[in-house]
Image (cartoon, helix red, strand yellow):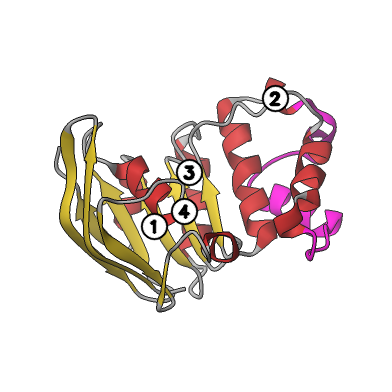
């Protein structure tokens, strides 16, 4: 998916968060966004997802201007993995299946075999499927959320601090895997230096 943010301006809580902000991300490109707290990193994701609207400017996805009329269909082509993963209590396998029951995902078929392959890829024991999601460690929750996004097979991935709770060796494994998904467009928010080893375009937001 190709993303083009054109002359975006946004006032938030009396502060000019964005003013004539431009960003173009080509199909398959990987972009790493950094910046201090309050610089608008997570807000940018909410704007791209259509959860917020800018005061001025436009966001184009594959040439379509994001609008209330098409936000639902465009959002179905995106995957958003947040650093906030407190989603309640349920077995991991039920939590994953519930995502496939959402109206936006009912056209997809859940494949447990593929899920287990991802579990192996990201060093999660198969037995974790039977555990309560709320009792997983922070790093385990991050990996499960990432696996769900990969199972949904979206075109644009918005990843917000998805390796912050994972140890260094496993973090490298996760980043290397994501970097190898050449056909997927990815925008990553992270302060993790592990991402900087790869040839991602880097953007620094100022507070």
Judge depth for marks 1 and 4 and give the one in front.
4
Q: Which mark is residue 88?
A: 2
Residue matched to label 3: 171
Label 1: state its secondary structure. strand
Residue 40 appears in which quarter of the rendering?
top left
10 Å crowding of disc 1: few (<14), some (14-19), many (20+): many
Q: Position of residue 194 (x, y in %)?
A: 36, 47
User: Of label 1 and label 2, which has the lower sequence position?
Assistant: 2
User: Of label 2 and label 4, which has the lower sequence position?
Assistant: 4
In this view, 71 is above or below 206: below
Residue matched to label 1: 187
Residue matched to label 4: 49
User: Of label 4 and label 3, which has the lower sequence position?
Assistant: 4
Judge depth for marks 2 and 4 and give the one in front.
4
Asked whether, in this view, residue 136 is left or right of residue 3, the answer is: right
In this view, 163 is above or below 199: above
How far apart, in angstroms, are the residues tagged by discs 4 and 3?
A: 26 Å
User: Of label 3 and label 2, which has the lower sequence position?
Assistant: 2
């Amino acid at each position: 998916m190709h993303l083009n943010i054109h002359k975006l301006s946004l006032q938030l809580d009396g502060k000019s968060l964005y003013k004539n902000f431009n960003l173009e991300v080509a199909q398959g490109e990987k972009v790493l966004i950094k910046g201090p707290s309050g610089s608008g990193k997570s807000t940018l994701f909410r704007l791209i997802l259509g959860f917020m609207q800018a005061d001025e400017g436009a966001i184009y996805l594959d040439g379509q201007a994001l609008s209330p009329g098409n936000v639902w269909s465009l959002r179905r082509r995106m995957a958003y993995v947040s650093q906030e993963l407190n989603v309640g209590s349920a077995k991991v396998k039920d939590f994953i299946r519930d995502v496939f029951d959402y109206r936006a995902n009912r056209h997809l078929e859940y494949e447990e075999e593929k899920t287990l392959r991802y579990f192996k890829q990201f060093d999660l024991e198969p037995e974790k499927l039977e555990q309560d999601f709320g009792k997983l460690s922070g790093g385990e929750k991050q990996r499960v959320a990432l696996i769900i996004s990969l199972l949904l097979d979206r075109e644009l991935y918005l990843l917000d601090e998805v390796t912050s709770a994972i140890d260094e060796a496993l973090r490298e494994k996760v980043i290397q895997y994501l970097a190898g998904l050449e056909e997927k467009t990815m925008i990553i928010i992270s302060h993790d230096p592990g991402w900087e080893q790869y040839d991602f375009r880097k953007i620094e937001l100022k507070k």
